[in-house]
Image (spheres, rainbow, N blue to C red):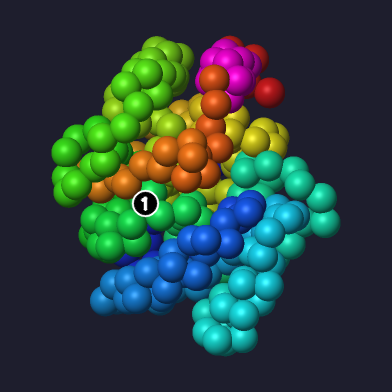
């Protein structure tokens, strides 16, 4: 298989946004993506509604009407999970580069220039945005949650031989040409360790970079969805997709 390298001329970006009951933040995050307007890049926004039970769908449809061909909405008839929504978004994406954006306000599109810089320079195929390197403000919240994230990253690194600092980050950006070598299966939050394992199996043909980002974490009262059971699933996924490679 030939090497996969991002093209310096690649300038179209598909921002894939999994959406599940994000009525309170969807309009704001889409507005921030539209406003990002990083010089030299064009953006399309691909929100994927995962059968929300609040007003997310109506809000997404209103955003499509407002912003025209900048937004293409995909919908799931039944709830399937973040990983499934991302797979749908990846299939719908038309850009040269795919950027994952959560629908809440934890991750700020103002960081797009930092995330896309290695692609602009033609040096990266994959970029991870790390919350643990100290660029910009980061909200202080749960110690045990952050410790768990560091533990999962370390465990993942042991099996992938990558030196990532934040495997669980939402901000993962990759050249669209690597979609087909990634046979993704996980429907929920197991997506993060699975996609990292899949990327590692293509490595060292892929050029992987990490950049510092800001982070405004939510509390559980504000709608944070990750719980300890997701951590157990992440451990399972790290072992399964690195050892069995299925």
Residue 241 rendering spot, x and y as whole percentages: 60, 21
Q: Any magenta on residue 238?
A: yes
Q: Quadrant of residue 51?
A: bottom right
Q: Residue 126: tell me if it is visible.
A: no
The residue sitting at 44% across, 68% down in the picture is 28
Question: Relative to residue 26, is residue 128 drawn left or right?
Answer: left
Q: Quadrant of residue 152?
A: top left
The residue sitting at 24% across, 42% down in the picture is 138
Residue nearest the observer in this picture, 76 or 175: 76
Question: Relative to residue 131, is residue 44 drawn left or right?
Answer: right
Q: Any magenta on residue 171?
A: no
Residue nearest the observer in this picture, 111 or 209: 111
Count of marks overlaid on the render? 1
The residue sitting at 62% across, 71% down in the picture is 60
Residue 142 rendering spot, x and y as whole percentages: 35, 27
Residue 105 rendering spot, x and y as whole percentages: 41, 55
The residue sitting at 71% across, 55% down in the picture is 52
Residue 216 rendering spot, x and y as whole percentages: 32, 46
Instruction: Tell me which segment is drawn in magenta.
Output: 229-240
Judge whether 54 appears above or below 34 on screen. Answer: above
Judge whether 4 appears above or below 148 on screen. Answer: below
Most frequent secondary structure within the magenta stretch: helix
Image quadrant in which the N terminus is located = top right
Q: Residue 107: tell me if it is visible.
A: yes
Residue nearest the observer in this picture, 42 or 1: 42
Q: Secondary structure at mark 1?
A: loop
| Residue marked by disc 1 | 107
């Amino acid at each position: 298989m030939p090497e996969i390298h991002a093209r310096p001329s690649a300038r179209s970006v598909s921002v894939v946004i999994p959406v599940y009951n994000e009525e309170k933040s969807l309009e704001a995050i889409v507005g921030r993506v539209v406003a990002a307007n990083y010089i030299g890049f064009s953006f399309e926004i691909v929100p994927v509604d995962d059968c929300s039970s609040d007003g997310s769908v109506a809000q997404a449809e209103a955003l499509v009407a407002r912003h025209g061909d900048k937004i293409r909405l995909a919908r799931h008839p039944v709830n399937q999970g973040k990983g499934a929504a991302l797979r749908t978004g990846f299939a719908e994406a038309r850009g040269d580069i795919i950027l994952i954006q959560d629908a809440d306000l934890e991750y700020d599109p103002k960081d797009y220039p930092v995330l896309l810089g290695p692609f602009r320079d033609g040096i990266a195929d994959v970029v991870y945005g790390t919350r643990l390197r100290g660029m910009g403000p980061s909200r202080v919240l749960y110690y045990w949650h952050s410790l768990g994230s560091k533990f999962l990253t370390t465990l993942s690194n042991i099996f992938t031989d990558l030196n990532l600092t934040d495997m669980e980050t939402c901000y993962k950006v990759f050249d669209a040409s690597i979609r087909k070598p990634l046979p993704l299966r996980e429907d929920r939050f197991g997506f993060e360790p699975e996609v990292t394992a899949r990327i590692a199996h293509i490595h060292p043909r892929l050029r992987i970079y990490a950049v510092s980002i800001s982070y405004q974490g939510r509390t559980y009262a504000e709608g944070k969805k990750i719980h300890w059971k997701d951590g157990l699933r992440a451990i399972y996924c790290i072992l399964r997709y690195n050892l069995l490679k299925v």
